[in-house]
Amino acid sequence: MAIDRVIHNTKHRMPTILSKEDEEKWLSPSLTKEDIESLLQPFNTDKMDAYQIENDFIKKAPNDPSILQRA
């Protein structure tokens, strides 16, 4: 199964993933609708990685780096 299918929720929404080059463009207050649409492109799945994390992340401090360790 493709990694993007695993991450999608039941309504088939997915967050926008931007390249480092596009981050500042995305934050620009002068973006036009066309600019926004040009940034909403599928992200290369070869550059993605997904894994489950432990369920106890709520008990840990929000900035505890162990939250992101692979289970």
Image (tube, rainbow, N blue to C red):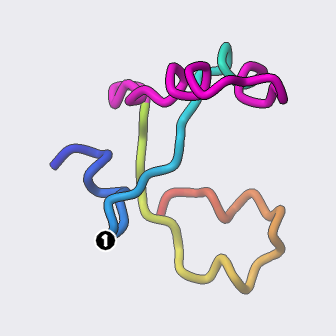
| Residue 58, quarter of picture | bottom right
| Residue 60, quarter of picture | bottom right
Q: Please, which residue is most extreme toward the front here?
A: 33
Q: How many marks?
A: 1
Q: Is residue 46 magenta?
A: yes
Of residue 51 and residue 9, the one placed in the foreground of this image is 9
Q: Is residue 22 left or right of residue 49?
A: right
Q: Which residue was labeled with disc 1?
A: 10
Q: Which residues are magenta?
A: 24-47
Q: Is residue 24 left or right of residue 49?
A: right
Q: Please, which residue is most extreme toward the top here?
A: 21
Of residue 9 and residue 66, the one placed in the foreground of this image is 9
Name the spot of residue 62 as percent of width and height, x first.
81, 69
Residue at image position (37%, 24%) is 44
Name the spot of residue 32 as percent of width and height, x first.
67, 23
Name the spot of residue 20 as percent of width and height, x first.
67, 20
Q: Is residue 39 left or right of residue 32?
A: left
Name the spot of residue 16 as percent of width and height, x first.
53, 41
| Residue type, label 1 | Thr
